[in-house]
């Protein structure tokens, strides 16, 4: 297990101390493949966007480093996963969708059909009118009624 020298400064910002002992403040973890391989390929970048360290896989880290990075990534990446589509106000856009997500029930407005992007055969990314990204990890895991509602937009 690899241990990264991570801590938080007085402002709560993530800091990284490199192998030369240089402390880099305002460090941001960035996933290379956030949808297809969220635990593989994470880069720590400084405030100017320069890469400081590359992490091939999060499983290589010790528990404390992994927990700090998981927390930083979770606060940076807000992407609810749609589990069901309960109601769609109209099959023409804009339309209001009522959905169940992994973070609870919500409602959003889909401005245009172009706001639904296919990531793979089974994954979709839906952007609402406020810019929030909703993920459908596997279309086939949705219930039949949800798939039928979604099919009208694809």
Image: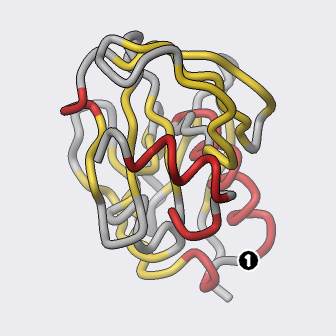
Q: In the picture shown, does residue 26 fall above or below 151? A: above
Q: How many marks?
A: 1
Q: In the picture shown, does residue 125 fall above or below 97? A: below
Q: Nearer the viewer, residue 17 or 148?
A: 148
Q: Is residue 20 left or right of residue 147?
A: left
Which quadrant: the N terminus?
bottom right
Display colour scheme:
secondary structure
**Residue 29 location, x and y as percent?**
46, 50
Q: Nearer the viewer, residue 35 or 124?
A: 124
Residue at x 44%, y 74% (from the top left corner): 37
Residue at x 39%, y 50% (from the top left corner): 151
State the residue position of label 1. 62
**Residue 137 location, x and y as percent?**
53, 61
Q: Is residue 106 left or right of residue 151?
A: right
Q: Nearer the viewer, residue 113 or 61?
A: 113
Residue 47 falls in which quadrant of the image?
top left
**Residue 22 location, x and y as percent?**
42, 50
Residue at x 46%, y 31% (from the top left corner): 26
Residue 74 falls in which quadrant of the image?
top right
Q: Secondary structure at mark 1?
A: loop
Residue at x 73%, y 77% (from the top left corner): 62
**Residue 27 location, x and y as percent?**
45, 40
Residue count near mark 1 (Cα–Cα under 10 Å), binned few <14, some 14–19, many ≥20: few
């Amino acid at each position: 297990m690899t241990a990264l020298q991570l801590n938080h400064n007085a402002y709560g910002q993530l800091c990284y101390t490199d192998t030369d002992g240089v402390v880099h403040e305002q460090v941001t973890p960035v996933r290379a493949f956030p949808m297809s391989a969220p635990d593989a390929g994470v880069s720590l970048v400084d405030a100017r966007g320069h890469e400081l360290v590359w992490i091939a896989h999060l499983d290589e880290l010790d528990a404390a480093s992994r927990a700090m990075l998981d927390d930083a990534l979770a606060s940076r990446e807000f992407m609810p996963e749609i589990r069901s589509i309960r109601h769609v106000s109209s099959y023409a856009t804009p339309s209001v969708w009522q959905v169940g997500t992994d973070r609870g029930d919500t409602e959003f407005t889909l401005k245009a059909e172009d706001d639904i992007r296919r990531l793979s055969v089974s994954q979709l990314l839906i952007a609402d009118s406020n810019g929030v990204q909703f993920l459908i990890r596997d279309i086939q895991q949705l219930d039949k009624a949800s798939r039928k509602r979604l099919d009208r937009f694809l």
